[in-house]
Amino acid sequence: MGIAHREFFRMPPDSEPGLAASAIYQVPNGGQLPKDGRVQMYPCHSCEFHLVLVAMDRVLCRPDIRAYIVGHDCGQVISPDVVRGMTLGGIAHGIGAALLEEFAYDPATGQPIAVTFMDYLLPSAHEVPEVTIVHQTTPSPLTVFGQKGSGESGYLGSPAAIASAVNDALRPLGVRIDRLPMNPDRISDLVADADARHDNKTELA
């Protein structure tokens, strides 16, 4: 190391001064096959839940998120600000996937239609509500500090929770939307069909 740092002229010809090292960390239970024949690559699992309150105006058919609570257990939280930022960012991403964002293509040419942010809608501070985060800390016995993964806790559950809340609001009409994004155009078509079939004027939840 001393030669490479201070006396690199003593090094063999055509060799560059410098040091390189590499190592692979093997998780405790990732190097062998358990009895069920599956490889468990991660030493622990994190948990999450999403609780969403959605209101819907019958005329506008626009889902309005009134409350959002997420609870997760990522073990020992090493950097609270980073974990909070990843969780909130994932929820914002999930709101966009569930309600706004869509890759639209021209059916005749196959060319993308949503080519600018005027067409491809992203959630803003107006669409993302204040989120309440509930931390449950159960340290993992298989990691150095008891930490678990937390990067996906916001995004993975968010679209499913929002979709479930929207369908719960539509349940009195006897309709269900199963395509993302759940935008007002698609919801209003379902509401109109329900009114035409049943003359149903039940107020939405």
Image (tube, rainbow, N blue to C red):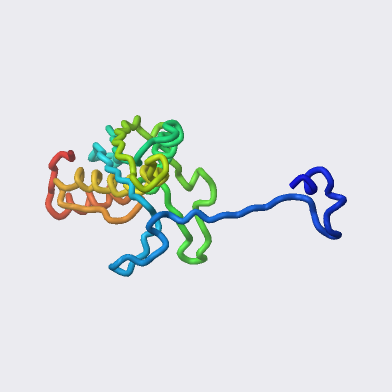
Q: Count the marks.
A: 0
The answer to whether residue 190 is above or below residue 31 is above
Q: Please indicate, yes or no, whether residue 95 appears anywhere in the rendered image.
A: no
The answer to whether residue 137 is above or below residue 111 is above
Q: What residue is drawn where x is 32% and y is 47%? A: 157
Residue 100, image x, y percentages: 39, 45
Q: What residue is drawn where x is 35% and y is 45%? A: 99
Q: Please indicate, yes or no, whether residue 143 appears anywhere in the rendered image.
A: yes
Residue 96, image x, y percentages: 40, 44
Residue 151, image x, y percentages: 42, 44
Between 16 and 124, the one lying in front of the other is: 16
The quadrant the C terminus occupies is: top left
The answer to whether residue 74 is above or below residue 28 is above
Between 43 and 124, the one lying in front of the other is: 43
Q: What residue is drawn where x is 54% and y is 51%? A: 115
Between 163 and 26, the one lying in front of the other is: 26
- Name the outermost residue toward the bottom: 37
Q: What residue is drawn where x is 16% and y is 48%? A: 171
Residue 141 occupies quadrant: top left
Asked whether, in this view, residue 175 is left or right of residue 150, the answer is left
The answer to whether residue 28 is above or below residue 56 is below
Asked whether, in this view, residue 137 is left or right of residue 15, the answer is left
Residue 53, image x, y percentages: 24, 37
Between 43 and 161, the one lying in front of the other is: 43
